[in-house]
Image (cartoon, rainbow, N blue to C red):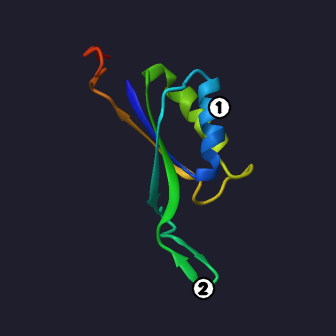
Amino acid sequence: MLMIRAIIRPEKTGVVLSELSDGGFPAVTKIDVMGRGKQKGVKVGDVFYDEIPKEMIMMVVQDEDKDDVIKIIMKNAKTGQKAAFGDGKIFVSPVLEAYTISSGNREL
């Protein structure tokens, strides 16, 4: 199993979640986050925004589903055809164990 964390623009969250669900991946956790990437914030006029609002979508998928999930997120989180700085980042990491609290079952 793999944990996929995608940090995306808030205005893209709805379409990304909808497309993930339509693609067979309805189970997600969504968290409001603040941060910045390589660009170190954004300057708009005389105002510098050091931390920018984003959304983090977290989900656990089977190894063989990783590429499909990443393609869905990449396609729907982009700004326009070419994309733009600040569109986000996807992180993938292994999940060694998972447990369902209600049943106590271990899932792998």
Question: What residue do we see at 47% from left, 63% from top?
Answer: 36
Question: What residue do we see at 34% from left, 31% from top?
Answer: 94
Question: What residue do we see at 27% from left, 26% from top?
Answer: 96
- Element under disc 2: loop
Q: Mark 2 points at which residue?
A: 46
User: Of all residues shown, which one is farthest toward the bottom?
Assistant: 46
- Give the quadrant of the C terminus: top left
Q: Position of residue 18 (x, y in %)?
A: 64, 33
Sequence order check, earlier mark of 2 and 1:
1
Q: Quadrant of residue 21?
A: top right
Q: Which of 89 and 14 is in front in this view?
A: 14
Q: Where is residue 101 in the image (x, y as percent from the top left)?
A: 28, 22
Q: Position of residue 25 (x, y in %)?
A: 54, 24
Q: Is residue 102 left or right of residue 90?
A: left
Q: Nearer the viewer, residue 46 or 71?
A: 46
Q: Where is residue 47 in the image (x, y as percent from the top left)?
A: 57, 81
User: Of all residues shown, which one is farthest toward the right?
Assistant: 81
Q: Mark 1 points at which residue?
A: 19
Mark 1 nearby-residue class (10 Å; few <14, some 14–19, many ≥20)? some
Q: Which amino acid does label 1 sit on?
A: Glu
Mark 2 nearby-residue class (10 Å; few <14, some 14–19, many ≥20)? few
